Amino acid sequence: MKETIKKLTECFGPSGHETAVREAILAELPRGLETRVDAMGNLIVHRKGKAGGWRLMLAAHMDEIGIVVTHVDARGFLRFGNVGGVHLLPLLGGRVRFADGTIGAIGVEKTDDANKIPGMEKFYIDVGAKSPDDCPVRVGDVACFHRTCEERGSRIVAKAMDDRVGCAVLVHVLKDLKECPHDLYVVFTVQEEVGLRGATAAGFSVEPDVALAVDITLTGDTPECAPMAVSLGAGPAVKIKDRAMLAHPGVKDWLLRTAEASGIPCQREVLVMGTTDASVIQVSRAGVPSGCLSIPTRYAHSPSEMVDYGDVQASVRLLLGALAGPIDIG
Ligand code: CO
Ligand code: ZN
């Protein structure tokens, strides 16, 4: 499974440009599943259930944050805007990668106050061009942050862990799932980071009875961070609420009960910022009981997002347990 995480996190896939990720996921999926790609680019994988089973949707997003070129100047330097929630602090000295493999170094203009973080308009990208004519990229081209996936002990650090780790979890759930009475729709969504757009469409086409997102959440276990009752390595987190969703209490309890019955460590997540695909699936059609299983992640939305491998493996086990029997959401 570490291989899957490495492969998927190193893929190029800023929002709206998820093709490489989708192809990597398709190559990893077990045989014999129905797959289709919808008009937005969501990959919808169907595993048929039995009579009496529920129609269950599991979603993880394929896209990652990135940048989009807004201007190429006379000397070939690029100005850029954000694709999704890009933090300014980690930009300087970072590198980006375009779809064709072009690497750019991120620089910044001189500043009057070295203690103040300049706005994004003060940063630029240097791809080694000397003029617009020899510049390999154009206005509108997008890039992801350029980092390899590395591990030490049980920790894995990579770009785009948000949410390729969720994609990897769902790929392995599909690989390892044996008995499952439910009609399972595993959706690898597009454009989450720019407003949950892929899941919005997929929620309507799949028409689930119940839905779960698998995504990352923040932690409260690093120096001087905002307090939060989630730690790296203490198990996956069952979402209670985030900025845009109150998890369905029955769905939340179903996951917590499964964890307890199977002896899987898990945490309770209350996230004050951010949300997941589950928030829009929940309010699709006439409403869908929805929840979220979260993988604790340090340094979210930076080029070095860190997870604990034990949490990732426990997430797969918890989902396998939840899917094996009847769903009771009260
Ligand atoms: Co995100
Ligand atoms: Zn995410």
Image (spheres, rainbow, N blue to C red):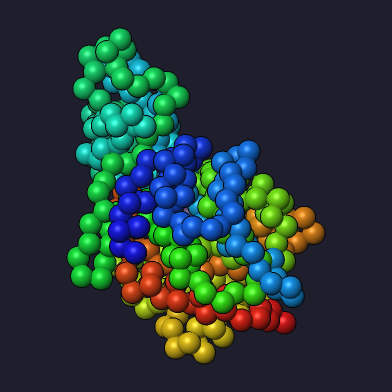
Of residue 60 and residue 50, the one placed in the foreground of this image is: 50
Quarter placement of the C terminus: bottom right
Q: Is residue 130 left or right of residue 314?
A: left
Q: Is residue 130 left or right of residue 226?
A: left
Give the residue at x 44% y 44%. 23
Q: Is residue 28 left or right of residue 35?
A: left
Q: Is residue 316 left or right of residue 185?
A: left
Q: Residue 256, relative to residue 141: is it above or below?
A: below
Residue 145 found in image quarter: top left
Give the residue at x 25% y 26%. 126
**Visible in this render: residue 323?**
yes
**Visible in this render: residue 300?**
no
Of residue 75 and residue 120, the one placed in the foreground of this image is: 75
Indicate the position of residue 156 as horizontal and vertical percent values: 28, 62
Indicate the position of residue 309 as horizontal and vertical percent values: 32, 69
Q: Residue 52, relative to residue 32: is it above or below?
A: below
